[in-house]
Image: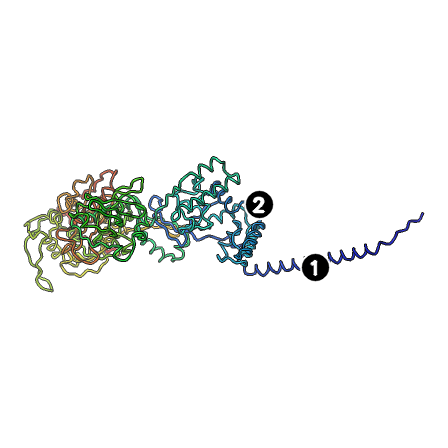
């Protein structure tokens, strides 16, 4: 049987042709769309940064300074950031960040399409610009490569970059880059730095509520700042906790406990505030050597010589000494008043309040209320009340002293749990001071205070101020004499005398306007008698004395005239302390050292410094001088320190009209110097000698520096050598002159 096929109906043929044309048209449209997209992507990706750069990317990081025990004492940065690894961020922090910022981070390919479309629709309806809906990867691409402007163009670039980043890096790498780069307010970048700043702990030690607080900050760091807006920060933190609960990251019990926890901030103190003068000296050195950009952006690690504990002791000793001086000279008043200058109590903010306030701090406070029996003060977040007993030293009644709106200077004695401080009324009349301490064995600077308040004056009086040395110069005179054959027990006449000089007769006087007749050199130095020092200098020649001063490291050019022997020459505190360390160091001077090692971001050593030693005098001369300077402390002008249970020696210094007060002294291990005076050369007041103004500060510091240490002893002078040929004691007269160190 033959089979036949009927032709398809005409309608069916037409439908097939129509369908073919429709498919062909759709293919053309799809091709056009694809071509447009390719062109679109090409246009937008032409100027995009290369994601390959991320493999070499290193964020700006903080240069940190460490003390001799590895504790941070300062930092330099354009952005405060500490780089951390993925393992340094605990799971609770990662969960908190992902729950509030990007729930599908582990699943998506850099972009969450539905979130973007939803956000775009809402913004179009509201007439706004595309914002939000960014994944962590998109945020990373924006923060690293793009501007913060909110436009469709930037959003598209953000998406394209995010896709490239996801193709090239793992999720762990992306999260780490994000966690190190994100801004968290207060100049803080990255969660590791955020944990250290807001809670004074490492990120790995964060609790749930702390992690949630940090995770909530990237959305609007300034708006949700826990420092400036604690209520907003609390609400945002709890929102993060709720998101974690919804995602199953925590249990209901954990969520409830975390939500009920108060904000427990422990804002880290500015490390630069402990030793600002020292830190500034180091900054200047680093910038000279490595350049400002590298210092502030390169993440250097700088090992310094400072001892944080000794620095804290130095700060307290100097400020307490200045306060004692102020009280001796009575209340002067002249307080600035906020209200009289057109300000308001509510709006007033003092720079002192930006630094952590703790017991022992000297800060300015604002009088906000007053009655006959008390005055209420505000100092930052703390309150305080002054009673009549607190101001008794002024010998005035409270209504005579203070008025509402006055800015007063106080010492914080203690701080109660309720934010109420106990304070004492002090004053700042402008008197300044400086303290510097060296380790005798290395020349390392262990403490440096360059003035009363770094914020008020950055001039470093320990290293920059050239001040008249007064009687602290006299040991160089006696060193020259001993080095040239004199003995501490040689007798010299302390009596009225006149010296013939090129400018005419010079008739000197002693401090007490008295004369002791025949006395030993040892006693003449201990009692700081002027006439014997001048006679010694005159007999050797003042040029010889000046030469010895230069050997000891005094750089100032000194005129060769006799009054230089009494300290009519200028020098810095740093020079004097370094010079006096020659005595306990057996005649050698170790050049003062600020830092021991500098490494770069990758740990490569850029420089390493070792003690630099210069010969100055013989060990015999140095030990004899130590014994003579011991007499100054035991029975001389520094006898107030005789009761301290340590081997101590030193020399007081006072200039004409009491404009400068000095004490430079040492133990076998430490040399420390103190200077007190006004920046302008005016008198400290009658009888404000070095023994009265500077020595108590030195004693307070040395008590702290030597606490818990063995008393120690100085090496005794060697017995004089006997010349076998002449059967006489050898003296250095015939010995070759010491070569001057440069």
For residue 78, the mark is none
Q: Is residue 564 above or below residue 707?
A: below
Q: Nearer the viewer, mark 1 or mark 2?
A: 1
**Tag count:** 2
Apparent side of residue 624 relative to residue 285 in the rendered image (left or right):
left
Query: In the orientation shown, which residue stands out farthest toward the right?
Result: 1
The answer, for residue 732, to whether it is visible in the render is: no
Q: Position of residue 317 (x, y in %)?
A: 23, 46
Badge 1 vs badge 2, beta-carbon distance below 8 Å? no
Q: Name the residue under label 1.
A: 28
Comparing 286 with 153, the one in front is 153
Q: In this view, does 349 lie above or below 504?
A: above
Q: Name the residue under label 2.
A: 107
The answer, for residue 9, to whether it is visible in the render is: yes
Q: Dividing the image into 4 quarters, which one contains the C terminus? A: bottom left
Q: Where is residue 463 in the image (x, y as percent from the top left)?
A: 26, 55
Q: Which of marks 1 and 2 is nearer the N terminus?
A: 1
Apparent side of residue 3 relative to residue 694 in the rendered image (left or right):
right
Apparent side of residue 650 relative to residue 518 in the rendered image (left or right):
right
The kind of secondary structure element at disc 1 is helix
Colour scheme: rainbow
Q: In this view, does 168 lie above or below 263?
A: below
Bin the neighbour count of mark 2 within 10 Å (Cα to Cα): few under 14, some 14-19, many 20 and up: few
To which quarter of the image does residue 707 belong?
top left
């Amino acid at each position: 049987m033959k089979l036949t096929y009927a032709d398809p109906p005409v309608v069916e043929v037409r439908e097939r042709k129509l369908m073919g044309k429709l498919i062909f048209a759709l293919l053309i449209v799809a091709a056009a769309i694809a071509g447009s997209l390719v062109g679109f992507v090409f246009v937008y990706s032409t100027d995009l940064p290369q994601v390959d750069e991320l493999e070499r990317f290193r964020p700006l990081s903080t240069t940190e300074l460490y003390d001799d025990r590895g504790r941070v004492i300062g930092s330099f940065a354009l952005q405060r950031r500490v780089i951390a690894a993925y393992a340094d961020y605990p799971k609770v922090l990662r969960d908190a960040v992902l729950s509030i910022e990007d729930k599908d981070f582990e699943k998506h390919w850099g972009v969450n399409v539905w979130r973007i479309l939803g956000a775009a629709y809402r913004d179009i309806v509201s007439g706004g610009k595309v914002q939000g809906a960014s994944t962590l990867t998109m945020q990373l691409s924006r923060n690293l490569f793009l501007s913060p402007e909110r436009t469709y163009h930037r959003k598209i670039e953000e998406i394209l970059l995010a896709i490239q980043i996801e193709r090239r890096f793992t999720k762990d790498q992306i999260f780490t880059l994000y966690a190190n780069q994100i801004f968290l307010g207060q100049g803080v970048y990255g969660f590791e730095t955020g944990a250290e700043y807001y809670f004074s702990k490492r990120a790995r030690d964060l609790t749930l509520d702390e992690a949630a607080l940090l995770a909530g900050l990237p959305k609007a760091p300034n708006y949700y700042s826990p420092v400036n807006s604690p209520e907003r920060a609390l609400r945002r933190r709890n929102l993060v906790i709720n998101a974690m609960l919804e995602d199953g990251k925590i249990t209901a019990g954990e969520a409830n406990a975390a939500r009920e926890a108060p904000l427990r901030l422990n804002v880290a103190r500015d490390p630069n505030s402990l030793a600002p003068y020292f830190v500034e000296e180091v900054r200047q050195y680093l910038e000279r050597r490595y350049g400002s950009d590298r210092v502030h952006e390169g993440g250097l690690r700088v090992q310094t010589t400072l001892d944080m504990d000794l620095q804290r002791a130095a700060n307290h000793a100097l400020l307490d000494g200045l306060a004692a001086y102020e009280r001796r000279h009575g209340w002067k008043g002249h307080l600035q008043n906020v209200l009289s200058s057109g300000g308001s109590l509510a709006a007033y903010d003092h720079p002192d309040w930006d630094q952590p306030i703790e017991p022992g701090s000297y800060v300015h406070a604002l009088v906000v209320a007053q009655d006959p029996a008390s005055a209420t003060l505000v100092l930052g977040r703390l309150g305080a009340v002054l009673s009549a007993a607190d101001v008794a030293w002024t010998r005035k009644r409270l209504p005579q002293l203070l008025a509402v709106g006055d800015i007063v200077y106080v010492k914080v004695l203690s701080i109660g749990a309720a934010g109420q401080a106990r304070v004492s009324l002090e004053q700042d009349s402008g008197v300044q001071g400086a303290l510097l301490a060296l380790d005798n064995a290395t020349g390392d600077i262990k403490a440096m205070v360059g003035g009363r308040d770094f914020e008020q004056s950055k001039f470093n009086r320990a290293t920059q101020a050239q001040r008249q040395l007064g009687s602290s110069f006299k040991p160089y005179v006696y060193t020259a004499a001993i080095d040239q054959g004199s003995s501490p027990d040689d007798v010299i006449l302390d009596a009225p005398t006149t010296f013939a000089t090129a400018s005419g007769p010079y008739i000197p006087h002693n401090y007490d306007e008295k004369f002791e007749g025949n006395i030993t050199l040892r006693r003449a130095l201990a009692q700081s008698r002027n006439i014997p020092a001048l006679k010694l200098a005159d007999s050797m020649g003042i040029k010889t004395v000046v030469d010895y001063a230069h050997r000891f490291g005094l750089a100032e050019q000194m005129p060769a005239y006799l009054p230089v022997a009494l300290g009519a020459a200028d020098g810095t505190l740093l020079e004097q302390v370094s010079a006096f360390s020659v005595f306990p160091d057996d005649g050698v001077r170790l050049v003062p050292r600020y830092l021991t090692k500098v490494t770069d971001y990758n740990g490569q050593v850029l420089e390493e410094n070792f003690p630099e030693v210069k010969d100055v005098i013989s060990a015999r001369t140095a030990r004899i001088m130590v014994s003579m300077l011991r007499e100054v402390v035991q029975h001389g002008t520094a006898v107030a320190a005789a009761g301290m249970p340590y081997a101590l020696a030193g020399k007081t210094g006072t200039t004409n009209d009491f404009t400068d007060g000095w004490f430079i002294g040492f133990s076998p291990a430490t040399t420390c110097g103190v200077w007190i005076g006004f920046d302008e050369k005016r008198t400290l007041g009658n009888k404000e000698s070095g023994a009265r103004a500077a020595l108590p500060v030195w004693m307070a510091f040395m008590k702290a520096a030597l606490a818990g240490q063995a008393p120690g002893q100085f090496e005794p002078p060697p017995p004089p050598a006997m010349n076998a040929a002449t059967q006489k004691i050898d003296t250095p007269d015939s010995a070759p002159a010491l070569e001057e160190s440069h």
